[in-house]
Amino acid sequence: MGPSRLKAGNERLWALIAARAEKDADTEDIDRRIWDLFGERWAVMFTDLSGFSRSVREFGILHFLQTIYEHKLLLYPVIDAHGGVLVKEEGDSLLLLFRRVEPALKCAQEMMAACERVNARRKPEEHILLCLGIGYGDILRVADHEVWGQEVNAASKLGEDRAKAGEILLTDAARIALGDAAPQTLAELTEGVAGTPRSFRVPPLKSKP
């Protein structure tokens, strides 16, 4: 999808938002038109690297930029294998979409396993410390590079603010969407985040010998 189509999508969305902001606007009709044009249902994954401030302080920004580069080389084949769609890169974070939560979770678990295998051969300061959050629901998707929605925000909060190194966190909507595929030993977080009534920690997979 080329830049011209992205611009057209953005222009159309913001034209509708501008119309919505006008006095006496029929917001219900405009909202319906926006969701008809841009509404889609996806599993949303937000990844982050733990220890940014400490890594930069102790080893310098170039060391951390190398870690960002290496983690992309490691994770992109895993993401591709599970049908993930890269929406954007933001520093050491990735925003990804999956059609269903189950492949998103399997991808997350394999990403963690890949990091563990690499870290076992590295010095502690060279470890790739991945953490992430997964949500699921209706979002606004404009072309391939912009997404908005409650589950986008919740996944971002879980991945960036709540998850510790090696942790996979789920919104309540993602947990419900998993159904019988949800791990039986999910642990509910005691401290919630905006955008989801409950959130859960996925138990780590046992490492293969």
Image (tube, rainbow, N blue to C red):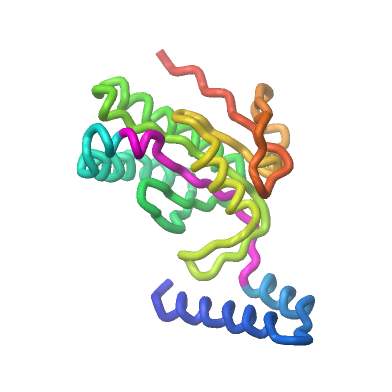
Relative vertical location of residue 90 with respect to residue 27 in this rendering, above or below: above
Indicate the position of residue 4 as horizontal and vertical percent values: 42, 80
Q: Is residue 207 left or right of residue 184?
A: left
Q: Is residue 153 left or right of residue 118?
A: right
- Measuring 45% from the left and 32% from the top, which residue is drawn there? 110
The foreground one among 87 and 21 is 21
The answer to which image quadrant residue 12 occupies is bottom right
Indicate the position of residue 120 as horizontal and vertical percent values: 31, 20
The answer to which image quadrant residue 207 occupies is top left
- Measuring 44% from the left and 54% from the top, which residue is drawn there? 86
Predominant secondary structure, magenta span: strand
| In the image, residue 11 lies in the stretch drawn in magenta | no
Relative vertical location of residue 159 with respect to residue 116 in this rendering, above or below: below
- Measuring 55% from the left and 36% from the top, which residue is drawn there? 162
Q: Is residue 102 left or right of residue 90?
A: right
- Measuring 63% from the left and 51% from the top, which residue is drawn there? 151
Indicate the position of residue 150 as horizontal and vertical percent values: 65, 55
Look at the image and tell me in which quarter the C terminus lies: top left
Q: Is residue 193 left or right of residue 104?
A: right
Judged from this view, the residue extending furthest toward the top is: 209
Q: Which residues are magenta?
A: 38-54
